[in-house]
Image (cartoon, rainbow, N blue to C red):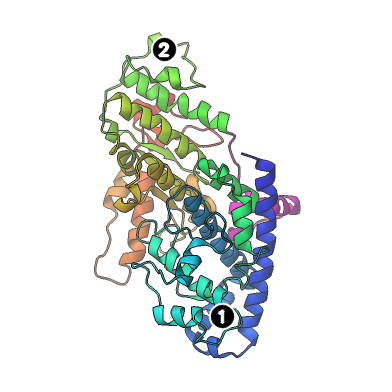
Amino acid sequence: MNTNSLKSFAAEARIKLIDQITRKLDFVLTHDTAELRGKQTEIAQLNHKIKQIGREQVIETVAYTWFNRLMALRFMDANGYTLPKVVTPLPGMTNPEILQNALAGHIEADFHLDRNRLNDLLDGRTASTDAHTEAYKMLIVAACNHWYTAMPFMFERISDYTELLLPDDLLSDYSIVADIRNGMTDEDCQQEEILGWLYQFYISAENARLIKSKKAYAKHELAPASQLFTPKWIVKYMVDNTLGQLWSEMNPSTSILRQLEFYITPAYKDQLTPRTKKRLEEIKFFDPCVGSGHILVYAFDVFYLMYEEQGYNMSEIPELIIKHNLFGTDIDERAAQIAAFVLTMKGRRKNSRFLRKGITPNVTFYQDFEDDSKFSNAKAIGSLINVEPEEMNAFKVETGTIYAEQQQKLKQLYTFLGQRYDCVVTNPPYIASSRMDRSQKRKCY
């Protein structure tokens, strides 16, 4: 993986997206066209959001949202997970396969979109300055909405100002779509870690600006200002010597330690009493500062070795790991989205039917809940919040009320932070003893 090339691509993509979305926002708010007259609800949402969080933050959020989605679609294209390909042409073609198919009269049967309008655009029956681009926009939105069922954390349904601010240039050789294709080679996309690296590089300029400013940060600046990405060898060292060691204490005859490159046999090993053996599905691994998921991704690989050693059906292993073993949370919603997506892609790589299962990884992000004393400032405090099991068990959702949806999100955070884990691993390493059974303290960093 050429990280220098990825860094250049991601940084330039951010600049281009912010510029194009800024110009699109100015156009939407200052022009009166037939198309915009039919988008009054979305425009009202846009104005409300600008008043709520500010113009610059709206632009930044929409820019990253589209970078995130296009990056995810390109990754799936390169690995053959999307049929037809959404941002990638077939060999010898220039249009993305999904648009080329539509031009030939083939539209995915399970795509929800206005087929009459799409066909009118493609057949020239609807006036448009760029009919192919308008049609392609419809297809991208339909593809994102299609993937919502399998990955709601990455592909929230699009029907608002986010769609309205999608850049106009999507098909030229200088478009953001072309940049995504060229910046993420098929070879690079064979490694799930590319997604985390791209996120790091995408926000690197903002990270540098904030650190250089040496000021008190606004809450929305904390995530980009505090990003710390862990080199692969450190990830392996931490996981090998926590999860690997835990497994060896539960199963002294295990052979997987020979496959853990950075495992170090502890000098005090002979003094340890064997741990109580657990079913593999009961072992819980938690990263309270999950970022884009580098640690969980490698922990997935180690768990996979453990399941193989125990003779589990290989088609079942990815689902078991993602449903039962791996947990993570972060103050950065965007990073948490990538972590969940990366784990889903790990599952898909191991099982071709994984995306049909509708499994959402146990990854979430800290949110502020004004009426809850522990989480009223969660986006700033993050992993420093401590929840006792008694508090987790006592939390109840008032079903059938207008507060139920918000309370369900809060309950998820109480559950993530209140349950006990066998390994709590993050960078920088620390012992999170309050989140582990007392019998498990000694080797979880």
Q: Which residue is nearer to you in this view: 194 or 234?
A: 194
Q: Which residue is nearer to you in this view: 213 or 152?
A: 152
Give yes or no for residue 122 being in the magenta stretch. no
The amino acid type of the residue labelled 2 equals Lys
Please state the extent of the stretch shown in magenta in the rendering: 204-231
Residue 355 is left or right of residue 27, and the answer is left
Q: Considering only order in the chain, which callout, 2 or 1, is on the residue closer to the N terminus?
A: 1
Q: CA distance from mark 1 to mark 2?
A: 62 Å
Which quadrant of the figure has residue 60? bottom right
Q: Position of residue 69 (x, y in %)?
A: 51, 59
Element type at marker 1?
A: helix
Q: Which residue is mark 2?
A: 269
Q: Which residue extends farthest right?
A: 212
What residue is drawn where x is 53% and y is 45%? 189
Above/below status of 303 relative to 212: above
Which quadrant of the figure has residue 273? top left
Q: Position of residue 445 (x, y in %)?
A: 47, 30
Give yes or no for residue 229 being in the magenta stretch. yes
Closest to the camera, between mark 1 and mark 2, is 1
Q: Which residue is mark 1?
A: 47
- Label 2 neighbour load within 10 Å: few <14, some 14-19, many 20+: few
What residue is drawn where x is 36% and y is 56%? 150
What residue is drawn where x is 61% and y is 39%? 1
- Label 1 neighbour load within 10 Å: few <14, some 14-19, many 20+: some
Q: Position of residue 100 (x, y in %)?
A: 50, 66
Q: Which residue is nearer to you in this view: 251 or 7?
A: 7
Residue 45 is left or right of residue 371, and the answer is right
Element type at marker 2?
A: helix
The overriding secondary structure of the stretch rendered in magenta is helix
